[in-house]
Image: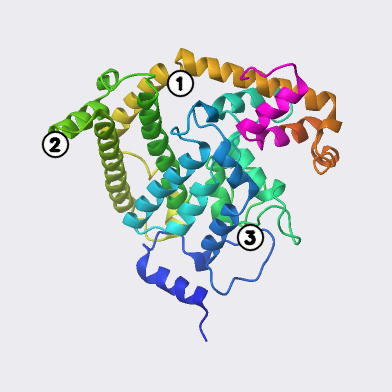
């Protein structure tokens, strides 16, 4: 009797584009495992990611605003869910493998430390000369090494396709690869789509959060062509709607416009390059998932506005500086006295060295746990 997995793999052959990543043709896992009778390879990856402790902790990790600043702002978990939704929509429209796109999207920020990019930059500085710190590499480290749920192997033993999507910048990957592949290959289109979906999601939800928190106003954002066009269209279509509804409608329209542009651009480039299968993608499809020149220009304008008016805003800057001090204080406390670490963490010093052991532990913390630990080790936290 044909297994459910085989039936689903057969359906992929019929439904997906020939240049999509097909589950039955996966390049496999580092540690051989029998296939699951009901779930194709990429679905299994997705399920493993969802059940990790690292995924659960994203709920209490900063996106831009520290978690306790308010219940309505995005966290790293809600950001991840939004990226997954956008990526799946794009993948479905293009005939790509939704389950691979979803697995990559759900794992792409597992390695983010507490306090968002401020925490990442601080850990990178503290690890200078010891390999540095970068959240994509840390996400891969989590799924390959740090998560310990399976007795037969370290990490999650994900497929190569999911792992390469997590690292994104493949040239920086130095781990094992399937025979015949090297850092010169192009990423799958699914992984490329997730990369752009990530940008679509964070630009638009940061725009929403900034206006919601009054970092800048809807009128301030009128200097960006994307917001101006879609806000004016929303106001014209719904003249009686209040400001909050108009903001939501305008952002929805921006996302739709960017997704539509990306889909059209990918379809055009696939045709121009004559991509017939995944081998063609690997050989010559670098940068296929990208906006049109016009949308790329407008998107850059929006990113520049957010950098100037939000990420460098004094209020956000104060939160980030406090976060940096908290990370630095914790790092010093653990490096100087590793006995403060949980017993299950300490043995990793022999394998990874003290600083990497401490970096791994701190990067896995939620915002609130980092604050609680800092209060234990000092007279008072910068956030208290």
Give residue 29's mark: 3
For image coordinates 47% across by 53% down, the residue present is 102
Q: Dot 2: within a 10 Å radius of its alpha carbon, few (fewer than 14), some, or many (20 or more) residues?
A: few
Give residue 311's mark: 1
Q: Dot 1: within a 10 Å radius of its alpha carbon, few (fewer than 14), some, or many (20 or more) residues?
A: some
Q: Position of residue 380 (x, y in %)?
A: 70, 17
Tell whether 158 sits left or right of 75. right
How far, Cα to Cα, is label 1 from label 3? Answer: 39 Å
Q: Position of residue 99 (x, y in %)?
A: 47, 58
Q: Taking the image as drawn, is residue 347 in sight? A: yes
Residue 204 image-quadrant placement: top left
Of circles 2 and 1, which is in front? 2
Magenta residue span = 360-384
How far, Cα to Cα, is label 2 from label 1? Answer: 31 Å
- Viewer-nearest residue: 27 or 323: 323
Helix, strand or loop status at disc 2: helix
Helix, strand or loop status at disc 3: loop
Give residue 355's mark: none
Of circles 1 and 3, which is in front? 1
Tell whether 16 sits left or right of 119. left
First along the sequence among labels 2 and 3: 3
Give residue 237's mark: 2
Of circles 2 and 3, which is in front? 2
First along the sequence among labels 2 and 1: 2
In the depicted structure, whether residue 161 falls above or below residue 248? below
């Amino acid at each position: 009797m044909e297994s459910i997995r085989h039936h689903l793999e057969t359906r992929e052959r019929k439904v997906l584009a020939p240049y999509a990543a097909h589950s039955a043709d996966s390049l496999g896992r580092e540690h051989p495992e029998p296939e699951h009778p009901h779930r194709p390879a990429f679905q299994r990856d997705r399920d493993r990611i969802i059940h990790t402790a690292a995924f659960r902790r994203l709920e209490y990790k900063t996106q831009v605003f520290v978690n306790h600043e308010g219940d309505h702002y995005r966290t790293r978990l809600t950001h991840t869910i939004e990226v997954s939704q956008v990526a799946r929509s794009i993948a479905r429209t293009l005939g790509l493998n939704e389950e691979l796109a979803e697995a990559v999207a759900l794992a792409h920020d597992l390695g983010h430390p507490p306090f968002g990019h401020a925490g990442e930059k601080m850990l990178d500085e503290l690890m200078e000369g010891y390999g540095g710190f970068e959240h994509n590499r840390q996400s891969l480290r989590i799924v390959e090494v740090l998560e310990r749920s399976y007795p037969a192997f370290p990490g999650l033993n994900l497929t190569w396709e999911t792992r390469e999507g997590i690292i994104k910048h493949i040239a920086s990957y130095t781990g094992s690869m399937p025979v015949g592949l090297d850092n010169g290959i192009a990423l799958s289109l699914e992984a490329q789509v997730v990369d752009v979906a990530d940008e679509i999601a964070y630009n638009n939800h940061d725009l929403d959060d900034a206006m919601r928190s009054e970092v800048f106003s809807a009128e301030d954002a009128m200097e960006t062509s994307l917001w101006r066009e879609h806000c004016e269209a929303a106001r014209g279509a719904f003249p009686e709607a209040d400001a909050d509804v108009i903001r939501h409608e305008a952002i929805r329209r921006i996302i739709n416009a960017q997704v539509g542009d990306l889909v059209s651009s990918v379809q055009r480039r696939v045709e121009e390059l004559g991509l017939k299968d995944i081998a063609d993608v690997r050989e010559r499809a670098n940068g296929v998932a990208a906006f049109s020149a016009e949308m790329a220009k407008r998107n850059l304008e929006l990113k520049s506005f957010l950098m100037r008016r939000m990420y460098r805003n004094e209020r956000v800057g104060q939160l980030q500086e406090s976060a940096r001090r908290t990370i630095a204080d914790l790092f010093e406390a653990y490096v100087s006295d590793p006995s403060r670490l949980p017993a299950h963490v300490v043995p990793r010093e022999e394998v990874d060295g003290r600083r990497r052991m401490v970096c791994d532990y701190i990067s896995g913390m939620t915002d609130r746990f980092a604050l609680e630990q800092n209060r234990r080790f000092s007279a008072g936290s910068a956030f208290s």
